Amino acid sequence: MTTFDYKSYGNNINPQNLVIFLHGYKSSMEDISPEAALLSSISPQTLVITPQSPKVHPRNQMRYWYDISEFDTEHKRHNPQTPLSEIVQIYNAAGEQLAQEANRINRFIYEIQQQYHVADQKTFIVGFSQGAMLALYTALSRDNKLGGCFVISGLVAGKDKLEQDINSYPEIYLFHGLKDDVVLPKTIDFSADWLKKHNIDFKLETFENLDHKIDNQELAKIAEIINE
């Protein structure tokens, strides 16, 4: 029995590559099923796994990886008028929760790797929104270097705790829509600067007319990198 319930897509017979794809806040593994299926179809030697968070809010019955609302009861992080420094501190407050969940995701990655005999350099982690923030924390804090980490509409969350927990330096790919009204584009420079400060290689790509969602262009770029 694995750490999380999950769905799988694509090549589950001797896959060359493994992708762990994390859903966002108020979402589920079913919600990202179309994107996971598309990614597996354009990367035919890849097995895509979508774990599901077991955490459910008693108030709205929505799933979450960590409870950001605990630190932002007024939803200031979505308000363009909120200073960047305040947004960063809201997400920074979730560091302990992120660290705990990253440990569980890393344990899950190991379980799936053992099951399908895929090495770290052929294992990638993708996340959207809150799942992107957890993916980044997971990739940087794990003992072994992954093949890459794809951060879709996310940012560096839990920065102070993560600074203490960095163990690995995989290639990081930041994808962000410039019309995003959930994880505001004003956070992009903060994430880039933080990664530079900690000598973490990354590539950044922004999308002019994209709001807070996963775009097929992003999936195509992920597949291109995985297929190299």
Image (cartoon, grey):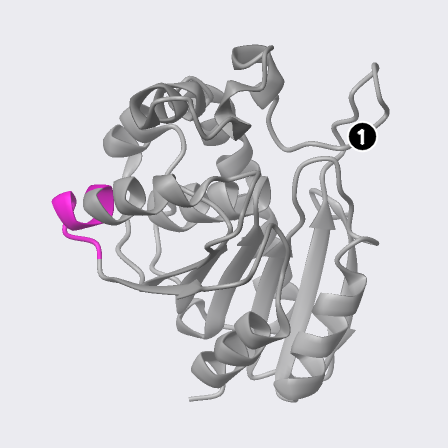
Q: Position of residue 65 (x, y in %)?
A: 63, 33
- In which quarter of the view is residue 146 placed? bottom left
**Amino acid bearing label 1:** Met
Which quadrant of the figure contains the C terminus?
bottom left
Q: Is residue 128 above or below residue 161?
A: below
Q: Position of residue 227 (x, y in %)?
A: 49, 87
Is residue 71 shown left or right of residue 23?
left
- In which quarter of the view is residue 87 placed? top left
Please report the bounds of the magenta region as a residue range. Answer: 194-200
Res 118 visible: yes
Q: Position of residue 22 (x, y in %)?
A: 63, 51
Residue plotted at (40% across, 69% down): 147
Residue plotted at (59% across, 27% down): 66
Res 167 visible: no
Check if residue 167 falls in the magenta segment.
no
Kindly identify which residue carries mark 1.
Answer: 62
Residue plotted at (69% across, 63% down): 49
Q: Secondary structure at mark 1?
A: loop
- In which quarter of the view is residue 55 placed? top right
Residue plotted at (83% across, 14% down): 59
